Amino acid sequence: MRTLYTFIAVLFLNILICPAQVTDVVTGINDPSRLLLDGNTLYYCTGSEIFKIDVTENSPTPISVLSGLNGVVGMTVDGNTLYFSEFNAGSISKIDLTDPNPTKETVIDGLNTPATIYLSGTTMYYSDANDNVVNKFDVTDPNPTTVLVATSNVNFSPTGLALQGDILYMGQGQANRVSKVDVTSGVTQPVDVVTGVQRPLGIRIVGNNLFMAEYIGNKVSIKNLTAGSGTAEDVVTGIDKPTDIEIWGNTLFIMERGANRIVKMELQLGVTEFNANRITLFPNPTSAFIEISNLRETTNYIIYAIDGSQVGTGTINPKEKIDVSNLSSGSYFLRTEHGAMAKFIKK
């Protein structure tokens, strides 16, 4: 009987995350590369240009943000500043998004082939598959110096990056795995998270779930980070060489390099339950502030004490911190307007 229940549970999970029909968002993209979601704005890049669309529109019209670039591979945004890497130029630059005619400003150059970038506070992480490293630097430093975060002598080849708390996840395209390091530990040897995935280029974390764009596998897969070792489950298959993904609410956007387009699909219950009901807060425990990991859009929140009384409310934007220094020591719950909830401890 236990075997039967297990089989039914596995079957039910597979039904919940089975492929759904994808629909076109933008077609005819020349040399599509990466995606970046900021609120309702989805940025995408080709080798030489960055575009943006409004994901709330049924048939969005791409708007050019910046052209004349040299191998754009990575993008990240902080407020009104868009950072981007230029693989062929060996540099990471930025522009002011409020400027109608932005001019790029070099943040750091002299790199080899910087690819995916990820900004946390003032710390910029970037991957370089040809140097076999993930490095970091301070974007506020006028003369930044790179510091090694991760490397390995065994087929490292890092590509996509995603940060959750102090844990940096790295897609290893040539090694067909995703690994991780604790960025506060000083240990640069990555530890495997999931293996057997087929060239995971773009990765994203939502709650406790790791989504992966498998370029050679022609699919998007998912791995529950709380489940320990195990294989990834398919979210959608039959995708033509996906290079990146983004998630907006229950909608999954996919960059299809092989089809020169961006498509989208609605995530079904087995996936969206994680998105809707689970968030991660860090640092936790905390003495001063908390942040919602991988928050993608502005949201309202309420903080409850353990007895159910409301002790705080507010609105938070992606990468902002919530000041909880005035709370007494103890356990609390934070709930967003979308119903996501997480517990944290105030020291």
Image: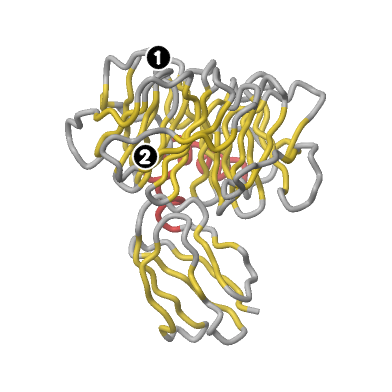
Q: Badge 2: few (under 14), some or many (20 or more) residues near its Cα, within 10 Å?
A: many
54 to 291, vertically: above or below? above
Q: Quadrant of the C terminus?
A: bottom right
Q: Nearer the viewer, residue 221 or 241?
A: 241
The quadrant in which residue 331 appears is: bottom right
User: What residue is drawn where x is 33% and y is 37%?
Assistant: 42
Looking at numbered disc 2 in the image, what kind of residue is underneath it? Leu
Q: Any mark on residue 191, and which?
A: none
Residue 131: percent from left, percent from top: 71, 23
Residue occupied by mark 2: 267
Q: CA distance from mark 2 to mark 1?
A: 27 Å
The image shows residue 200 at horizontal and vertical percentages of 57, 26
Q: Residue at x 64, y 42 (%)?
A: 143
Disc with the residue nearer the chain's start (2 vs 1): 1
Q: Is residue 131 visible?
A: yes
Q: Quadrant of residue 50?
A: top left
Quadrant of residue 100 within the rendered picture: top left
Q: Residue at point 32% right, 17% down?
A: 29
Residue in view at x 65 percent, y 42 percent: 144
Give the labeled residue for mark 1: 31
Q: Is residue 328 left or right of 29 when viewed as pictured? A: right
Amino acid under disc 1: Asp
Please say if the residues under marks 2 and 1 sit with CB atoms less than 8 Å apart: no
- Is residue 1 in view from this perspective? no
